[in-house]
Image (cartoon, rainbow, N blue to C red):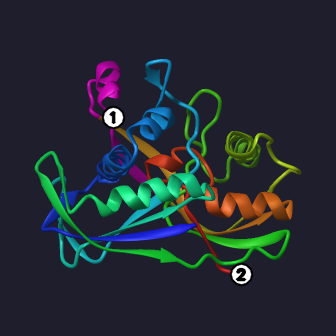
Amino acid sequence: MRLRCDFKGDKIPLSHNLMFVSLIKEALKKSDSDYYEKTYFYNGKQNKKSKNFCFAAKMKGFEVEGDTANLEDGVSLFISSPDSEFMIYLYNGLLKIKEFKYKDFNIIRGRISLLKEKKVNSTEVIFKTVSPISIKDNRNFFLEIDDERYEKELNYIAGKILENYRGRGLSEKLIFQNVKMNKVVVRQEINTFKEKSGKNYLCINSYEGIFKLRGSLEDLKDLYTLGLGFKRSQGFGMLDIVY
């Protein structure tokens, strides 16, 4: 399932991923607080298990002013998930949010639309990113796309994403081919990171563009809806199909 929610406002943070993480959490709380708690907490602690969704926020023109993006024609939130329960709770919660405030920023919800998904009909698919893909190793170092370990670590996180969603990982190894991917560095605010480094943000190396992925038909279908890579529930890894 895919959903689009439009917002109007004068400005949002230039690093706005966490703003929309907060919005998604607020929507789930308003829809069903027990479901929200189950999704984000476990035994009273933050649940670090990967979530069954990914998202992307797209601004329709903007001007940069310091750490702020001054909006020209609003911003749209795109969310993808194969988990119908999550999407129903999210949709109902968004309906209850007319206005959302985040720090010094304020946006007004507009239209919510369900989007038609494309079909995965082959074991080889050309994807393009809707939000950038981030891959890291077991030491939490973000990898360059030409690193010899990139495909291995991509397979690792893809397997974990599928296992957390459906109870089993990859059916077969994924073969990744860079078609036209470009590096982007995304700055993400992280309060706990400040305690360790003195900074309140983390620079995340990631890639956007077009790539080919070969694997099992079922795996590719699920990854199309779940997203690919790390930090999917924080605005990374959302995919669209080129052909």
Task: Residue 243: give its label.
Answer: 2
Q: Is residue 137 above or below residue 185?
A: above
Going by the image, does 201 lie left or right of 140? left
Residue closer to the observer: 201 or 1:
1
Q: Position of residue 169 (x, y in %)?
A: 79, 43
SS category of the residue bearing label 1: loop
Residue depicted at 12% across the width and 68% down the height: 10
Pointer 2 or 1: first along the chain: 1
Write the start and end of the magenta stretch as one range.
184-200
Q: Position of residue 107 (x, y in %)?
A: 18, 62
Q: Is residue 179 above or below residue 170?
A: below
Quadrant position of residue 46: top left
Residue closer to the observer: 53 or 43:
43
In the rendered view of the protein, which quadrant contains the C terminus?
Answer: bottom right
Residue that label 1 marks:
190
Which three-letter amino acid code belongs to the residue tagged 1?
A: Ile
